[in-house]
Image (cartoon, rainbow, N blue to C red):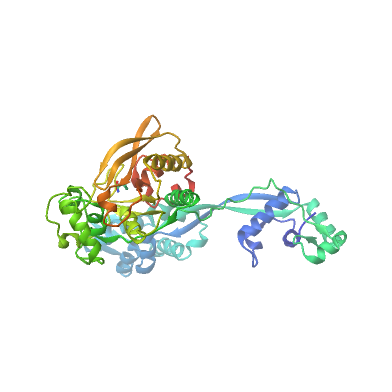
């Protein structure tokens, strides 16, 4: 049984070979080709493929088509006299014109080019000129060979498909015309009176062309996975700005103003804006006291004179913990809160296989009455287990804003890899906020996680626009 499209195509075929391109009509070549394949599969047509050579002009060929061939220029100069001294030939035309004029019958004698049979030479040149003009329909083998050698045309091979109908095909077509249309689309009417119709059969083994769909970037896939995990633990997602004040990025986190991380070597400070005003003067004053001598917390602080000016310096955020502290500030009067943020951060690192000056962190904070270190470790273990890393360990570490502080490592491929830091905010951080409940916080690298999941050797691979990789990469 054949479909309407197949019948139409069969009707156009006879018992002589027809080039498939001539069957196009309004249809796309791929539709014609696949219909022919179907018909061939059903043994209703004969098909043969011919290798066809196509020619087109090279850049040089195009130039000569416009400006004339060098031998033509020289020939024009000696049309009358039949001779020219070699030293009178324009140097740029000399070499090429001698080769070809000679080939077309000219002689070189006593330092001159001599043409006796002008007609013959002219014919030779004309043949090349005509060939350049009609490069699409070149037939003459010798001319093609010459022009290819001269680099004036190039050759491309393509396959052309020819088809003709056979006996079985003619019968199928006759049958089709008697029985009526084959249905390829199911409509209400067809369903109601299905006995009256013939349906197109499907061949599920028929090869089809592969399709590539748009897809998320691999890093984005990981980020969305992380978001799902924190959403499922009841966290809310927060966002922050790339440009921040030192105050929020560091001072509010009890990082002393002479801390090495604040150095120009490590942090991108900004010229514009160069300052960001501190919005809550009351809070800033409490931060100042804590830094200077611990205020009324029992801490001694860092024992130096805290400067507003330094705190107002604008920078590109060096960690997403800045969003966590801003969030804690906003929610300081709540009994409990929990939030996470994922975003780009900036540090003056020299790029190497595991470092870039820009990368992504996932930061989280949680505060409630019974929050504890054990709870923090539980959250981190749960998070990494959900990401596919069952084996993690924590080690004592140091951050100016947490006590105790923990480093988080995951076990992968025989090694322990450091993926982030965490801890319980010090009272020097929570006291100026007026928060009494413990606040758990963590900040973890996202790219390293992605490198492990996608088995990458260098972090850079995540940022080069290699479409093939993006299409094919699979999570492991
Ligand atoms: N901000 C730290 C970093 O960038 C990680 C961290 C976050 C540590 C929160 C403790 C608490 O490495």
Residue in the picture at 80% in, 54% down: 1
Picture layout, residue 69 above or below residue 362: below
Q: Nearer the viewer, residue 220 or 198?
A: 220
Q: Quadrant of residue 345?
A: bottom left
Relative depth, front residue between 230 and 294: 294
The answer to whether 286 appears left or right of 386 in the picture is left
Q: Residue furthest bottom?
A: 80
Taking the spot 45% from the left edge, 56% from the top edge, the residue there is 143
Percent of width and height locating residue 383: 44, 43
Q: Position of residue 31 (x, y in %)?
A: 64, 59
Tell how many labels: 0
Whole-percent x and y of residue 181? 81, 62
User: Residue reaching furthest top?
Assistant: 414
In the displayed structure, does residue 302 sit left or right of residue 354? Answer: left
Q: With respect to residue 372, does 123 lie above or below?
A: below
Residue 106 is at least partly visible in this image? no
Q: Evaluate whether residue 31 shows in this view.
A: yes
* 121 lies left or right of 4: left
474 up-or-down from 159: above or below: above
Near-viewer residue (8 or 182): 182
Rendering coords of residue 356 (x, y %): 29, 48
């Amino acid at each position: 049984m054949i479909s309407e499209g197949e019948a139409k195509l069969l009707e156009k075929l006879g018992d002589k070979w027809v080039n498939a391109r001539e069957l196009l009509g309004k249809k796309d070549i791929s539709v014609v080709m696949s219909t022919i394949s179907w018909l061939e599969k059903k043994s209703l047509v004969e098909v043969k493929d011919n290798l066809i050579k196509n020619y087109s002009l090279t850049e040089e060929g195009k130039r000569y088509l416009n400006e004339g061939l060098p031998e033509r220029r020289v020939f024009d100069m000696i049309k009358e006299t039949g001779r020219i001294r070699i030293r009178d030939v324009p140097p740029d035309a000399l070499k090429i014109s001698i080769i070809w004029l000679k080939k077309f019958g000219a002689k070189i004698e006593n330092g001159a080019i001599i043409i006796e049979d002008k007609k013959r030479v002219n014919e030779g040149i004309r043949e090349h000129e005509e060939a350049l003009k009609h490069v699409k329909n070149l037939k003459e083998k010798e001319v093609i060979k010459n022009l290819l050698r001269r680099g004036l045309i190039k050759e491309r091979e393509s396959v052309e498909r020819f088809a003709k109908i056979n006996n079985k095909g003619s019968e199928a077509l006759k049958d089709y015309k008697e029985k009526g249309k084959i249905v390829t689309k199911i409509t209400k009417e067809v369903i109601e009176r299905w006995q009256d119709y013939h349906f197109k059969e499907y061949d599920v083994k028929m090869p089809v062309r592969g399709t590539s769909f748009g897809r998320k970037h691999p890093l984005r896939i990981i980020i969305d996975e992380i978001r799902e995990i924190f959403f499922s633990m009841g966290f809310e997602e927060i966002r922050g700005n790339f440009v921040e004040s030192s105050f929020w990025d560091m001072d509010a986190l009890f990082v002393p103003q002479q801390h090495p991380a604040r150095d120009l070597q490590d942090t991108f400070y900004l010229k514009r804006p160069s300052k960001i005003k501190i919005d809550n003067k009351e809070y800033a004053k409490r931060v100042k006291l804590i830094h200077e001598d611990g205020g009324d917390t029992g801490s001694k602080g860092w024992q130096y004179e805290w400067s507003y000016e330094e705190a107002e310096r604008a920078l590109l955020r060096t960690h997403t913990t800045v969003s966590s502290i801003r969030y804690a500030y906003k929610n300081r009067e709540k009994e409990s809160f929990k939030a996470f943020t994922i975003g780009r951060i900036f540090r003056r690192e020299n790029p190497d296989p595991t470092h870039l000056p820009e990368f992504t962190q996932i930061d989280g904070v949680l505060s409630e009455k019974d929050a504890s270190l054990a709870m923090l470790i539980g959250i981190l273990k749960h998070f990494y287990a959900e990401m596919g890393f069952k084996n993690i360990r924590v080690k004592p570490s140091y951050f100016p804003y947490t006590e105790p502080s923990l480093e988080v490592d995951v076990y992968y491929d025989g090694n322990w890899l450091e993926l982030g830091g965490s801890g319980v905010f010090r009272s020097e951080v929570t006291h100026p906020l007026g928060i009494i409940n413990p606040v758990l916080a963590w900040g973890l690298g996202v790219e390293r996680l992605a490198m492990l999941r996608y088995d990458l050797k260098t972090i850079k691979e995540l940022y080069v626009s290699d479409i093939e990789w993006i299409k094919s990469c699979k999570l492991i």
